[in-house]
Amino acid sequence: MRSILTLLFLFVFECSAYAAGAVVDYQVNGEPYEGYYVSPAPDASLVLLIHDWDGLTDYEVKRAEMLAELGYAVFAADLFGKGVRPTEIKDKRQHTGELYKDRAKMRALIQGALDTAKAQGGNVDKAVVMGYCFGGAAVLEYARSGADMKGFVTFHGGLSTPEGQDYSTAKGKFLVLHGTADSSITMADFAGLANELEQDGVAHEMITYGGAPHAFTVFGQDSYREDADRKSWQRFVDYLADTLR
């Protein structure tokens, strides 16, 4: 039986004349994962995209295609494992919780995804890591590892820093896009991150959007806010043009 991502790939391939994406099976520490890679040109700058707590779904693939149409190669990573796409809240909490408890594994999974993107032809020397919700928290975890990337971007992501960690070795430019009405990740969390980044001398820009709740960019959900989505996406596009030029 074909996987959901395989069927989605076939749909995208038929509908997109600009850049054809492909499902990519890969392994990290002997475990199977299933990502999605799309690139408009062999030398295109790379965006490594980290999914939210649903796992890698059609939402991330759609965002990857949007970025490919702008001229970027994109690897949408899989941090949960091949075929693991939780739909129940308890399962989503389980899979994210396991990685929150094992930060070394979270970092290794992102590095494994980046290595896979490189093997697909992605230009990891001109690359930004971005993520949504849980993926945003994962992006910041990777940034605190000192990963040598051009930048790190979160959309309504988790912003808290685990005890014993900081941004003293962080590199690149940070862009944090957040909803002021987010009750899951509060403005106190937002301010806390701003203070940490400033204290550690990290180049950053942080924007909040009034009235936007958690997951304000996710199409089709009650949380979706078109105005905040449009504005945050445009800021992201401008950021990529400046950071990866």
Image: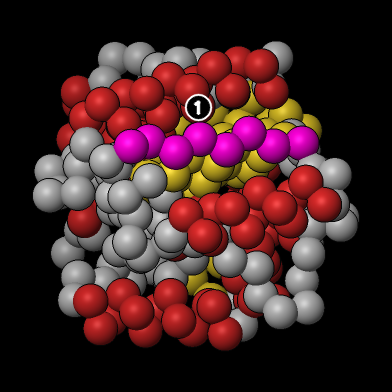
Q: Is 209 within the magenta?
A: yes
The quadrant in which the N terminus is found is: bottom left
Crowding near the residue tagged with mark 1, few <14, some 14–19, many ≥20 C-alpha atoms within 10 Å: some
Q: Examine the rendering and report whether any part of residue 63 can be seen.
A: yes
Q: Is residue 39 left or right of residue 106?
A: left
SS label for mark 1? helix
Residue at image coords 43%, 70%: 80
Q: Amino acid at mark 1?
A: Phe
Front-lying residue, 30 or 215: 215
Horizontally, is 41 left or right of 105 in the view?
left
Along the viewing direction, whichever of 241 and 222 lies nearer the viewer: 222
Q: Is residue 40 visible?
A: no
Q: Which residue is mark 1?
A: 236
Q: Position of residue 33 (x, y in %)?
A: 47, 65
Q: Which residues are magenta?
A: 203-210
Give residue 36's quadrant in the image.
top left
Expressed as whole percent of the image width and height from the top left, the position of residue 175 reads: 60, 37
Quadrant including the C terminus? top right
Residue under the point 79% across and 57% down: 167
Q: Nearer the viewer, residue 22 or 126?
A: 126
Q: Colour scheme of this structure image?
A: secondary structure
Counting from the top left corner in percent of width and height, residue 113 is at 59, 55
Residue 213 on the magenta span: no
